[in-house]
Every structure is written in structure tokens, then in C-alpha cells.
């Protein structure tokens, strides 16, 4: 029987584990989630890994500890499953920077370009439905390389990730002018300063960082690839330029090394207020009450599904 919500001596994490069994649920968590949520998850990873996990799960319920576009992506590819997000207001500045109506108007205005639209997964279902293919930071290079040479590419919504892929592939693309409010807080000065303090520590940075910061990095990659970079690096200390939640997983999986959070001009580390909206209490409440739940009109879901499936097929 499903627990009443009264705590009979069980702690919250144990109650969640029990509810998870009763609901036949799987818990997926992004690398930026608070440590307590990472610790109760069945899988912790980047957007690409989470999409694959969502695609292959046999569970009836997905409790998605991440932001809205991530849970929405899980729902798009799992229409018959119930997808819960601990806090429905956990949004994303990148997703907000590209409303579907604005993209539609832009595409109509530039119909002569016959754009092949590549959308970074950090966008709404409406934007996905207008796109030809989706990518994540983990496969963006591969997805762009796979595009026909005869097509004009419009890359939405992250100008920094888009610019990084242009640098890597040499493929020209028109870039939507969106960005992640967390990663643009890192500056060449803030990262230069920490480099001076730890001259032997390599710098690993997320591609959502601005060009001047990426220039200072020894490696630029998705959050999942940061784990393998840090594991394989011979260095004992590494400067990690991304959202600070990443450090929990690094400390847990690579216990012998020191991980230094990349500072911004204002703070010793950077936190995404959207990612931090999810808490253990909200996760418990979501599984107990089976809400907040992600729902989508079927025609929109279907249109948004095709470019995601194309991505999953291509980046296997
Ligand atoms: P990753 O897919 O690299 O984890 O990035 C997701 C994200 O939101 C970065 O800000
Ligand atoms: Fe969006 Fe940036 Fe937060 Fe990632 S860190 S969810 S891109 S606002």
C-alpha cells in the first residue's frame, strides 16, 4: 500500500525508496541536482545519458530530478508513462530565451533559407516540434557533422554551444542569441585568477561558457564527459567550470582527487537556481501524490518526438 505521508520512523530517503517500489518508479537525476537527490537516484548523468535512460526504462513512473525541459523530453518519448517533476517551476534560462512563437516567426521570415534546425535539448516541446533534430552538449559535434552539406543550419537556442561546435567542425551555422545565465557568469578574469592560484590544475569547462572562458580550458565537454576527463587526468586537482552540483558526483566517484569549483566575478562557485528548486521533500511529495506531472497535447508531443528519436538513433 502507498504510504500515507506520515513518517513512522523512516527517514525521507527510505520513504522515497519504499514509494518508488510501490509505484514501480525510476528516479533519474541530473548532475546539477542537490546531493540528497543524486544519492537516491537510480541514474545520475547528463542530458544525453538521461534521455537514453528515459527511453529504455521499464518503470511505469519516471521521477525526473532535473529541470522542466528534461522531464518534458522524458514524457515526449514515453507517452504512456507518468513523468513527475518535483518542482514544475524548475525552468531554464536557455529554454526561455527561445519561445516557440518567436522561432516560428523567424523561420517564416527566413523561409528562403530553408533552414535545417538543430535544437539543443535545453528547449521547450514547442521548439523541438519546429526542429529537424535535437542535440545535447554530449553529441552536438556529431549531430552537426551529420547534417547535409547543402543545407543552411540554424542552431538554437545556445549561442555559446553553437559557436563551440562551429570552432570544432568548421561548419557555418546561424546562431540563436540565447545563453545560460549560469555559465555566462564565468569570465576570463575569474577563471584566470583561479588558474594562477592552482597553476598545476587543468581546467575543464562546459561548452555553454563564453568563448574567452573556453579559451582558458584544457578540455571543453558535457557534464558526463567531465567525469571521465577527471578520472583519466593524471592531475590531483582539477578546476571544474560549470554548475557546482557537478562536484558532488566527482567527489563521490573519484574520491582521491581535489575538485575546485570555477568561480564567477561574484561567487566562489556557480549555482543554477532552477536546478536547485528540487528538494528531497518535493521528490517525496511528488511520488506520494503523483504530482506535479508533465502532460502534453498529443499532436505537439508527436511532432516533438521525431527530432529526439532522430538524435537517439544517430548518436548511438
Ligand atoms: P549536460 O547535458 O552537459 O549535463 O548539460 C545540461 C545543462 O543544463 C548544462 O547547463
Ligand atoms: Fe538551464 Fe543553465 Fe540551469 Fe542548465 S545551468 S538548466 S542551461 S539555466
Image: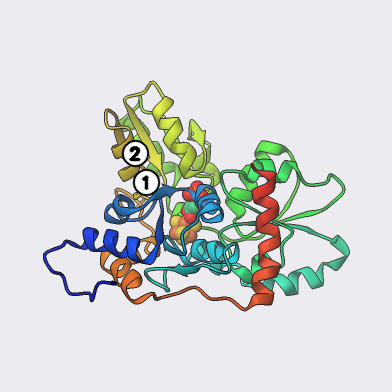
Residue 228, compared with residue 123, is above or below; it is above
Which residue is located at x 32 percent, y 49 percent?
Answer: 269
For disc 2, the neighbor class at 10 Å (few under 14, some 14 to 19, many from 20) is many
Label 2, secondary structure: give it.
Answer: helix
Q: Which mark is residue 246?
A: 1
Is the CB of the residue bearing disc 2 within 8 angstroms of ligand 1?
A: no
What residue is shown with label 2? 250
Query: Which residue is pictured at 52% across the width and 39% down the height?
Result: 221
Give me the residue at 41% from left, 75% from top. 292
Badge 1: residue crowd in 10 Å (few <14, some 14–19, many ≥20): many
* Relative to 17, 62 lies left or right: right
Q: Are marks 2 and 1 in contact (CB under 8 Å)?
A: yes
Q: Quadrant of the N terminus?
A: bottom left
Q: Is residue 38 above or below residue 98?
A: above
In the rendered image, residue 114, in percent from the top left (x then y), is placed at: 85, 61
Across and down, in percent, residue 91 comes to 46, 68
Residue 312: image x %, image y %?
Answer: 64, 49
The quadrant of the image that shows the C terminus is top right
At horizontal 68% and vertical 69% (from top left) the residue drawn is 302
Residue 181 visible to an observer of this rendering: no
Q: Which mark is residue 6?
A: none
Amino acid at each position: 500500500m502507498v504510504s500515507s505521508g506520515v513518517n513512522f520512523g523512516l527517514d525521507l530517503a527510505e520513504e522515497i525508496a519504499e514509494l518508488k517500489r510501490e509505484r514501480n518508479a525510476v528516479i533519474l537525476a541530473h548532475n546539477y541536482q542537490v546531493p540528497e537527490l543524486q544519492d537516491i537516484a537510480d541514474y545520475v548523468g547528463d542530458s544525453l545519458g538521461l534521455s537514453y535512460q528515459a527511453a529504455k526504462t521499464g518503470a511505469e513512473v519516471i521521477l525526473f530530478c532535473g529541470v522542466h525541459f528534461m522531464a518534458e523530453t522524458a514524457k515526449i518519448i514515453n507517452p504512456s508513462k507518468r513523468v513527475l517533476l518535483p518542482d514544475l517551476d524548475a525552468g531554464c534560462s536557455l529554454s526561455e530565451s527561445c519561445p516557440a512563437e518567436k522561432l516560428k516567426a523567424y523561420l517564416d521570415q527566413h523561409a528562403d533559407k530553408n533552414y535545417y534546425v538543430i535544437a539543443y535539448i535545453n528547449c521547450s516541446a514547442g521548439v523541438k516540434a519546429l526542429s529537424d533534430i535535437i542535440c545535447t552538449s554530449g553529441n552536438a559535434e556529431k549531430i552537426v557533422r551529420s547534417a547535409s552539406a547543402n543545407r543552411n543550419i540554424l542552431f538554437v537556442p545556445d549561442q555559446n554551444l553553437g559557436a563551440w561546435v562551429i570552432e570544432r567542425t568548421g561548419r557555418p551555422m546561424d546562431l540563436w542569441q540565447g545563453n545560460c545565465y549560469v555559465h555566462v557568469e564565468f569570465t576570463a578574469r575569474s577563471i584566470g585568477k583561479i588558474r594562477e592560484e592552482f597553476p598545476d590544475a587543468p581546467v575543464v569547462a562546459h561548452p555553454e561558457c563564453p568563448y574567452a572562458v573556453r579559451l582558458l580550458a584544457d578540455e571543453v565537454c558535457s557534464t558526463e564527459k567531465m567525469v571521465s576527463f577527471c578520472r583519466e587526468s593524471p592531475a590531483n586537482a582539477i578546476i571544474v567550470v560549470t554548475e557546482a552540483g557537478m562536484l558532488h558526483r566527482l567527489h563521490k566517484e573519484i574520491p582521491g582527487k581535489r575538485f575546485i569549483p570555477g568561480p564567477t566575478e561574484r561567487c566562489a562557485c556557480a549555482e543554477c537556481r532552477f536546478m536547485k528548486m528540487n528538494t528531497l521533500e518535493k521528490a517525496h511529495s511528488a511520488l506520494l501524490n503523483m504530482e506535479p506531472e508533465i502532460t502534453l497535447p498529443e499532436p505537439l508531443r508527436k511532432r516533438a518526438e521525431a527530432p529526439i528519436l532522430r538524435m537517439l538513433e544517430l548518436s548511438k
